[in-house]
Image: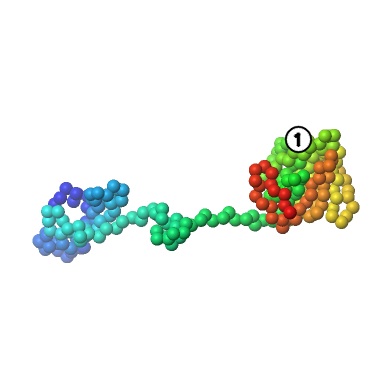
């Protein structure tokens, strides 16, 4: 009996009676023994192994060749990032981010194109409302030398594949020019659904053009998205 035998777990088959031969009876036992640290192993992996070792007569050092080692799975190696495993030569590139699946219209303000995946407030000095419901609107500032554009003039947001223009009780009002129809002035505080091709005038030459929901707007580069063809 060795010092490390105290940590072993013995799985013994039931016997009808004790034969009296302790060595012969012990040969039929199965011992679950914690693995010893392997000399030269510095990664600590051997200390986590479980060794199922049959009981043998008390040899001086035992015979490790008869042991069954149950080793826990290790973390994936760094070579798993290569296509074809460790022998592959082509790196596995990260998957491209999926394109937006929801179609929403876009608007053009000057040289900027904005996708209405969140509301947009346009004005001379736009500010967020005191009470927010849903996504935080994007603030777009436009020049107004004569002051025809109010601080927060209009709010534009998407309803399905259509755009909705809300007049934020502007001082000089908002003019809507639908494609192929007569223009009209929106009452202060009114809301109107606008389709592709509609132009919304807010004063001082500032217009908002409603673009198709099928238009593919490239991701913004910096603060100013590219102007589509």
How many marks can you see? Answer: 1
Instruction: Name, please, the residue furthest toward the bottom.
Output: 16
Q: Position of residue 221 (x, y in %)?
A: 65, 46
Instruction: Name, please, the residue furthest toward the left.
Output: 20
Residue beneath label 1, please?
125
Residue at 42%, 60% (x, y): give it: 88
Residue at 73%, 54% (x, y): give it: 229
Name above or below for residue 37 compared with residue 144. Answer: below
Q: For this view, does 148 lie left or right of residue 157?
A: right
Q: Position of residue 191 (x, y in %)?
A: 81, 47
Which residue is at the front of the view, 165 or 222? 222
Q: Position of residue 39 (x, y in %)?
A: 23, 49
Q: Quadrant of residue 144?
A: top right
Instruction: Name, please, the residue furthest toward the front.
Output: 89
Which residue is at the front of the view, 187 or 179? 179
In this rendering, does residue 160 appear at all?
no
Which residue is at the front of the view, 79 or 125? 79
- SS type, badge 1: loop
Residue at 79%, 37% (x, y): give it: 143
Circle 1 packing at 10 Å, graded few (<14), some (14-19), many (20+), is some
Name above or below for residue 123 compared with residue 101. Answer: above
Q: For this view, does 216 lie left or right of residue 154?
A: left
Q: Quadrant of residue 161?
A: bottom right
In this rendering, does residue 107 appear at all?
yes
Which residue is at the front of the view, 49 or 29? 49
Residue at 82%, 34% (x, y): give it: 145
Q: For this view, does 106 lie left or right of residue 186?
A: left
Q: Position of residue 5 (x, y in %)?
A: 18, 51
């Amino acid at each position: 009996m060795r010092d490390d035998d105290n940590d072993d777990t013995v799985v013994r088959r039931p016997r009808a009676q004790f034969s009296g031969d302790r060595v012969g009876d012990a040969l039929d036992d199965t011992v679950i023994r914690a693995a010893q640290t392997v000399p030269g192993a510095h990664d600590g992996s051997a200390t986590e192994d479980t060794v199922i070792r049959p009981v043998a007569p008390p040899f001086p050092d035992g015979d490790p060749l008869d042991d069954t080692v149950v080793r826990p799975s290790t973390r994936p190696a760094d070579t798993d990032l290569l296509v074809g495993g460790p022998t592959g030569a082509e790196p596995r590139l990260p998957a491209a981010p999926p394109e937006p699946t929801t179609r929403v219209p876009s608007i053009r303000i000057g040289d900027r194109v904005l996708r209405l995946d969140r509301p947009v407030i346009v004005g001379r000095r736009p500010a967020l409302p005191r009470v927010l419901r849903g996504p935080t609107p994007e603030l777009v500032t436009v020049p107004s030398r004569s002051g025809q554009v109010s601080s927060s003039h209009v709010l534009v947001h998407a309803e399905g594949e259509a755009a909705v223009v809300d007049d934020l009780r502007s001082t000089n009002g908002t003019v809507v020019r639908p494609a192929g129809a007569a223009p009209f002035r929106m009452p202060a505080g009114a809301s109107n659904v606008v389709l592709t091709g509609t132009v919304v005038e807010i004063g001082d030459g500032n217009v908002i053009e409603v673009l198709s929901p099928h238009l593919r707007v490239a991701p913004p580069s910096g603060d100013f998205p590219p102007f589509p063809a």
